[in-house]
Image (spheres, rainbow, N blue to C red):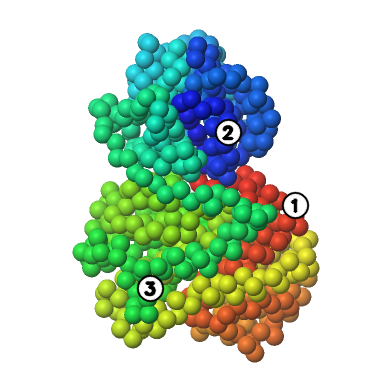
Amino acid sequence: MCGIVGYIGSRDVSTTLIAGLRLLEYRGYDSAGIAVAATGGEISMRKRAGRLANLEGVVGELPAGSVAGIAHTRWATHGAPTDLNAHPHMDEHGDIAIIHNGIIENFAELQRELLAGGHTLSSDVDTEVIAHLVEDAYQGDIRAAVAAVLPRLRGQWALVVMHRKEPGRIIAARREAPLAVGIGDGEQFLASDPVAILEHTNKIVFLRDGDLADLQRGGVTFYDAAGELLTPTIETITWDGAAARKEGYDHFMRKEMDEQPRALSAAMMGRVSSNGIAIGELDAITPALAAARAIEIVACGSAYYASLTAASLAERLLQLPVRVTVASEFRYDPPPLSSASLVIAVSQSGETADTLGAVRIAKSAGATVLAIVNAAGSSLTREADAVVLLQAGTEISVAATKSYTSQALVTMLVSLDLARRAGKLSAAEVRDWSAELLTIPAMASAALDASDALPDIARKYFGAKGFTFVSRGAGLATALEGALKLKELAYIHAEGIAAGEMKHGPISLLGADHPVVAVVLQSPVLPKLVSNLMESRARSAPVIAVLSGVGEWASFATDAVVIPAARHEIAALIATIPLQRFAYEMALLAGADIDQPKNLAKSVTVE
Ligand code: F6R
């Protein structure tokens, strides 16, 4: 959600922090702020509502020669995105500066207590209460003060704190919100996502829940939740600098869409060959896979739709119940779980609070958790029993594109490998699947080429009242994802719906000014879908169709984008690509901020 950067060392502190924030801005972008500590201790702060550029305009006013600093890019939870509510927050004496990602659930109670104790609170933000509590607890050691306050907080936090009297020190703490320490030589870094600091150091310590870190220029000391000294695990992270640059593209989204053939190929590397399918990462949970009597898939947003693409394939092959549930529902209303449940959590960031919440529920019920995740080193990778990485590379655009198709593909690969391991796919069937899977990158390239028809189609229908995306079977997930992309990127209302449901209500919306976008694949339900589309045409609705191997059935389409013919599960994945381009072109026409749509953030670390 929001982004945190911290730095202690001899570089120019403001410049280093702002450069880090630039790499994190996609995480949250409704306001930003920075606080720097001078050698003498004075803390100077600047905060601005709106994009990071607004903060960059005033950062030059900060005094030079600072020794440490913390900075933040925000996605508002409590309090509107104003200058005042932006982080950092301070106590009334300007002694303590604090930045917080997450939510303090008991903030109202703490606020009442602080007001009764004579404190003056100046913002609407839950975080500010922490600054005042630390102020009360402070007796000359900022680490001790923060450690004393943490047990009073309920909720989630990644927290960084500086005190005027200890200018060479930053305290960091986490609970259910990501925070990493970057170990340098005579300098130390902090970031909610290491991407912000990897150009300076690739030695990263991911704080675990309850951990606290005491950063000083010469080194970092780590403590666990009980306050005991901790020997940290220092991970060496590979820095993919190119992923953080647009490299000639106008938008990260367009670049990431074009990266799909490569990402899909990377997802299959070492897992699919002409001889078969084998995902080595599953070996670690072989007994649990054999014991599984039900599979529960949990995910949010696009990751949820990506998971749907393969779910019925998995159920058909494994002859086991396979259910896909939105993680925010699963975590508070879980199905019956036991040691015979395999829970698959699918996530790009590996930091989505609801998905992590669902995983914790599953683990506490004795289930085995398999994570399908893009971000190596993320919280989900540390909490799961086994991890299959997407290998899609960093995704910067807020809207999921290459991570979506990679999630759909890897979920499909896992389903196929589970079936192979269970003896439910013959060697010949596995070889057939492999042969077709290996053509996916080429099919994705062809779909990207076919998508060049979309700018004209988008111009033709821009201004329509709304769009209904339909399909049946595996294509339904694609329709749901297509509608989500259009909503989030172009701010146009769109709904994804099973085509057979149209006649039960939504068909009333249709007309010349309300087109249907159809995902039409070669599947047993094709004739049924075609009938639904003819019904739409009979109500004057234009039908924009993405067609895979449909041939003579295509007469219902007013506008068509033809992608390669493939099994419907695979075609469903490929058909997403033109729908991404449709949303992209509509967003361009709408003048929307494509990489950072309003009200959104890349990684949703609050519930
Ligand atoms: C939409 C989108 C979101 C994410 C969702 C889950 O384009 O990106 O709907 O898919 O927030 O995020 P992850 O996959 O990081 O768990």
Is residue 476 something one can see in this rendering? no
Q: Who is closer to the viewer here, 286 or 280?
A: 280
Give the x, y percent position of residue 239: 46, 48
Task: Of the two numbered discs 1 and 3 on the same chain, state the one appearing first in sequence.
Answer: 3
Q: In which quarter of the image is residue 64?
A: top right
User: Quick check: 464 left or right of 222?
Assistant: right
Is residue 52 something one can see in this rendering? yes
Assign a secondary structure to mark 3: strand
In the depicted structure, whether residue 129 falls above or below residue 396: above
Assign a secondary structure to mark 2: helix
Task: Of the two numbered discs 1 and 2 on the same chain, state the one appearing first in sequence.
Answer: 2
Label 1 to label 3: alpha-carbon separation: 41 Å
Task: Of the two numbered discs 3 and 2 on the same chain, state the one appearing first in sequence.
Answer: 2
**What's the residue type where badge 1 is placed?**
Gly
Q: Residue at x 36, y 60 (%)?
A: 388
Question: Quick one: label 1, few (<14), some, or many (20+) residues within 10 Å?
Answer: few
Label 1 to label 2: alpha-carbon separation: 27 Å
Q: Mark 3 points at which residue?
A: 272
**What's the residue type where badge 2 is placed?**
Ile
Assign a secondary structure to mark 1: loop
Residue 591: give its label.
1
Q: Residue at x 57, y 36 (%)?
A: 19
Give the x, y percent position of residue 352: 45, 48
Q: Name the residue under label 2.
A: 18
**What's the residue type where badge 3 is placed?**
Val
